[in-house]
Image (cartoon, grey):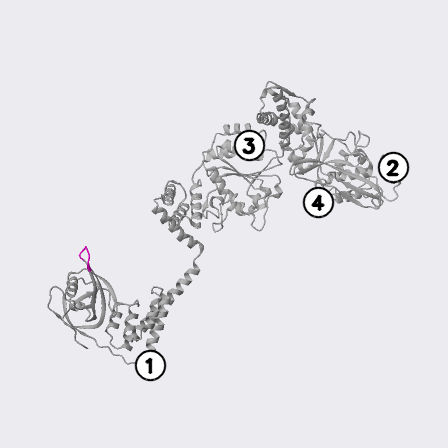
Amino acid sequence: MSDINNPVPLLALRDIIIFPQMVVPLFVGREKSVRALEEAERQKRPIMLAAQRDAKTHHPGPDDIFTVGTLGEIMQMMKLADGTVKVLVEGKKRARVKRYLDSDEYFLVEVEELEEHCDINAELKALIRSVTSSFETYVKLGKKISPEMIHQIHAIEDPFRLADAVIVHLNIKLEEKQEILETSDAAERLEKIYSHMKSEIEILQVEKRIRTRVKKQMEKTQKEYYLNEQMRAIQKELGEKDDFRNEIQELEDKLKAKQMPEDARDKTEKEIRKLKMMSPMSAEATVVRNYVDWMLSLPWNEFSDDKLEITEAEKVLDADHFGLNKVKERILEYLAVQQLVGKLKGPILCLVGPPGVGKTSLGKSIARSTGREFVRIALGGVRDEAEIRGHRRTYIGALPGKIVQSLKRAGKSNPVFLLDEIDKMSQDFRGDPSSALLEVLDPEQNDTFNDHYLDCDYDLSKIMFITTANNEASIPRPLLDRMEVIKIAGYTELEKVQIARRFLIPKISEKNGLAAENVEMQDDVVLHVIRHYTREAGVRTLERTVDAIMRKVAVKVARAGKERKETITIENIEQYLGVASYKYGKSETENQIGVVTGLAWTELGGELLLIEVAVVTGRGRLIITGKLGDVMQESAQAAMMYVRSRANLFGLPKDFYSKVDIHVHVPEGAIPKDGPSAGITMVTALTSALTGIPVDRDIAMTGEVTLRGRVLPIGGLKEKILAAHRGGIHRIIIPKENEKDIEEIPDSVRKGIEIVTVSHVDEVLREALVIDGSSTFGALLEEREHRYIDLYGKPAPAEGDKEREEKDEEAKQVSLHTH
């Protein structure tokens, strides 16, 4: 320890310790410190640089300052305009304050230099090498120190200078630096520095691992977020309007004004809060914004006022549609109950009928008559359950189902909702839409319908659901059980004439630019068109046919002027439509053997179905052609077995079937046919062909037959009778058990057709088979029937009763003669 040129001024430092060989710029503002600097500069004396124990102390005393510091020299000093002083000092050597001298202007102290101990040995050299190597690692990890410093450190051989050069760059606490400053032994000082450096290196390595891991985990969306934030900052600097903030405010205002259930409101508020925390350009923000838009655009508690005036509603329905009385009655019933009760769940109707009878357009009329909005969903070909319930928001491009979308389009929560072609839905791996409709069409469940996209309940109970279908059998049974089925069989000729006169001709004339005075078309002409150019249950073909007439009239009017008037008559109708497509009535002009007219039901309505039987020499084969289904082929086999069992009654040899081939054919072989209702038709055709007795050409029949000859009931009777009426048939044979369904046949049709009910095939044969053009096969059966008692036609004459045997032989000869 050596004395110094005492006394010297002292500069109290805050948050910094200056080591020997260290050059530091300082900004000094306290008066005592400034005067100490000025005094040292004036006397060209060193200055004691010691750190305060607490940097927050503004007026420190001797006890507030560390006793060990560094003697330094002032290299440069400059007074600034605000009174502070900028000074550049360099540390020279360590020193300790011996005592403070009395001085009010600045700290004046006596100091003594600290002696440093250094024993050069292997341990010190190892320490020097370790510190140098660790410092190199520290610099590479920290990347805040210039790499050139590594070379400078490697060039230092003196342990004291090495310690002072390294400690400056370590990020350690003030107290730890002060402790190293006060350490006089070189080895001890380097060991402490090495320990601190290893700790700092470990921290830096952990930081590096964290940075690497975070960098790997950073996804594209995070990068976009940072870029979008920068973009927002740039837009803000450019003074652009913050549209996103205004949009959120607009959404909040809409939510306050919107009437909606509490759970839906809470969910929307939550999504808006989430939206505030997102970048407007992020993908998630777009998803949330779309969801909020959907929630705010739905008519949660918005309803149309029902028109409860029954008379007015009836006028609207009658003005739009002719006939369809059952459907109209059901709508009026609903309005009447609504008027009396005041609150009623919407009915769920299913209109089943062939194409073109007005099922879809009826939905619009119902909406107009009740004063509700009208929406329509076409279900034909729909095979994804999400089409009904919507997609969950986790999917890209997710949307609500068609139910919710249609409600948004309607703008009200109680529209007339038409689910068109409900029998045409299918299913695949994406689900079964008909199962999703079970909740929609269940009055006990649809008040809490949950769409996957909205993820909250929506009340569908106020909606009037109307579904349409061509084939009731194609609708799943659980779904059909939830609906009230109303069958629309088709229109009679009279109804078609009225529809054409009231609706089709005025509409089509206007569509083609024709006035009422440009064309004249009487009802008899319309009836001729219906009979000879159309054959359908509905009026679509009739509409196209009338359109073809009006287009040709439009050509003539365009050539001759708007005053031209065209009169359409039966005589000139071929000029407009060409040769007639169909012949009205039966094409056969005489009774034929083995040809019978049957009645069939299809999705397009009722149809006439010819059945032909030919008998040729053969080996007992029964050939069935005409693309018949399994059930219809079985009906042919049952019919053949019945005829064989009655062979004796019909005057046929017992083994007749083993010597002939019988061919049963149903024309229009490209069209698939199936069902049991052609049973009595086949029995009649087979009996006619085998006995040679012709069938009455003006009779048609339908009914299922059993092996015992009983005639069972069938379905679609109304459609079948209407088809017979369209085909000009005047007599129809139906099962006795279908007699109750005759009430559904319009009076105009019943007046022109004689309906015969039967319970056994023998009754059918009595009516259908004609022997000589006037008498029927029934007369022959009555003459012979009392001789046989067995139901299957096996004769049972008393043994030795010659008289009976002779009469049997006589009856057989009569039968063979007619054959």
Q: Which residue is mark 2?
A: 813
In percent of width and height, residue 548 lies at 64, 28
Q: Earlier in the sequence, mark 1 or mark 3?
A: 1
- C-alpha gap between disc 2 and disc 1: 146 Å
Instruction: Kindly indicate whether the residue at mark 2 contacts the one at mark 4 (C-beta within 8 angstroms).
Output: no
For discs 1 and 3, the disc positioned in front in the rendered view: 1
Instruction: Give the residue at x 68% y 29%.
Output: 533
Q: Which residue is mark 4?
A: 631
Query: Residue 51, can we see it?
Result: no
Instruction: Kindly indicate whether the residue at mark 3 contacts the one at mark 2 (C-beta within 8 angstroms).
Output: no
State the image quarter where residue 714 is shown: top right
Q: Above or below — where is 339 with respect to 509?
A: below
Q: Amino acid at mark 1?
A: Ala
In percent of width and height, residue 383 lies at 57, 46
For discs 2 and 3, the disc positioned in front in the rendered view: 3
Q: Amino acid at mark 4?
A: Val
Question: For the residue carrying disc 1, how many other residues have a C-alpha within 10 Å: few (<14), some (14-19), or many (20+)?
Answer: few
Direction from residue 666 to residue 798 in the image, left or right:
right
Residue extent of the magenta highlight: 78-83
In percent of width and height, residue 631 lies at 71, 45
Q: Earlier in the sequence, mark 2 or mark 3?
A: 3
Between 751 and 417, which is closer to the camera in this rendering? Answer: 417
Q: Which residue is mark 1?
A: 122
